[in-house]
């Protein structure tokens, strides 16, 4: 019996050692885009947390690509261990720039998001293919005291333009609480993108009216997307209308880090 007990103890220790050797799950850092806020990730976060992922939804200032990317870069620098960066819409341009110089960033996930190449701006890519109607849905711009303008979507047009597959009661709240973006941020040119050196994943809806599906597909193909998920009829806010599908792709991107070489 003592011999059996010793054998069991050794086996238990070996199993525990293997478990301890498994790499830690990445922290998921989520970056919202224009006309949204961090709460737009709530459904996705709930799904990821159930699967044991630590999550951080950054409050993206939406002031400038360089400034916003620096803030996200600072957040990434504060995290110990691997990170998966996730960006929605304009947030895709932000993560493309913020990931540079951080060895702990393992994957990028673009959620109905811009993935510009060097020298490209979000506004350039939004108009590269037909089908986008954002310009027609904007409210009169808000002039800023320091110069420049803030852009909002007209609240009356918000649901049809931005979130047609989200219940009306929810979109009314989203429209009232939308975060504006400066025109300068949408026209600022991007730096050398991290998607050229990191594995990238894309998910978007073919009913997107902010960034035409053709543009999103073009960017996914150009970035060498490891997996592209196109959600039938989904709006620009796929993370709100279909959070489980978005979380599933993020988990797939995170699992890439956990796989043995």
Image: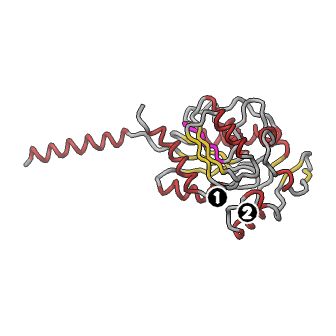
Q: Quadrant of residue 100?
A: top right
Q: Quadrant of residue 109?
A: top right
Q: Against 146, is 165 above or below?
A: below
Q: Which is more toward the observer, 156 or 194?
A: 156
**Residue 205, percent from left and from top:** 66, 51
Name the element at disc 1: helix
Q: Against 36, is 19 above or below?
A: above
| Label 2 with label 1: CB-CB less than 8 Å | yes
How far separated are the C-alphas under marks 2 and 1?
Answer: 11 Å
Q: How is the image coloured?
A: secondary structure
Q: Which residues are magenta?
A: 106-111
**Residue 61, percent from left and from top:** 75, 48
Residue 146 in sight in this render: yes
Q: Residue furthest left?
A: 1
Residue placed under numbered mark 2 in the picture: 174
Q: Which is more toward the observer, 247 or 177?
A: 247
Residue placed under numbered mark 1 in the picture: 240
Q: Which is more toward the observer, 170 or 32?
A: 170
Q: Which is more toward the observer, 17 or 188?
A: 188
Q: Answer whether residue 231 is magenta in the image.
A: no
**Residue 158, percent from left and from top:** 78, 61
Q: Is residue 198 left or right of residue 92?
A: left
Q: Badge 2, how many Cα within 10 Å: few under 14, some, many 20+?
A: many
């Amino acid at each position: 019996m003592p011999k059996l007990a010793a054998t069991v103890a050794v086996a238990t220790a070996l199993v525990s050692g293997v478990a301890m050797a498994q790499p830690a799950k990445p922290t998921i850092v989520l970056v919202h885009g224009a006309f949204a806020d961090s709460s737009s990730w709530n459904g996705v976060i709930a799904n990821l947390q159930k699967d044991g992922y630590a999550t951080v939804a950054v409050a993206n200032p939406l002031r400038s690509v360089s400034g916003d990317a620096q803030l996200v870069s600072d957040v990434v620098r504060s995290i110990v261990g691997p990170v998966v960066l996730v960006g929605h819409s304009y947030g895709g341009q932000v993560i493309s720039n913020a990931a540079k110089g951080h060895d702990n960033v393992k994957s990028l996930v673009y959620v109905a998001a811009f993935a510009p190449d060097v020298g490209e701006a979000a506004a350039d890519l939004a108009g590269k293919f037909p089908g986008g109607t954002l310009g027609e849905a904007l409210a009169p711009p808000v002039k800023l005291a320091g110069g420049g303008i803030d852009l909002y979507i007209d609240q009356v047009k918000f649901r049809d333009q931005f979130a047609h597959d989200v219940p009306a009661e929810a979109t009314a709240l989203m429209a009232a609480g939308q975060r504006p973006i400066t025109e300068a941020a949408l026209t600022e040119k991007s730096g050398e993108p991290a998607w050229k050196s990191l594995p990238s994943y894309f998910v978007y809806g073919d009913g997107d009216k902010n960034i035409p599906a053709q543009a999103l597909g073009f960017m996914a193909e150009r970035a060498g997307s490891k997996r592209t998920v196109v959600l039938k009829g989904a709006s620009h806010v796929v993370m709100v209308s279909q959070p489980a599908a978005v979380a599933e792709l993020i988990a797939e991107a995170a699992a890439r880090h956990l796989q043995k070489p």
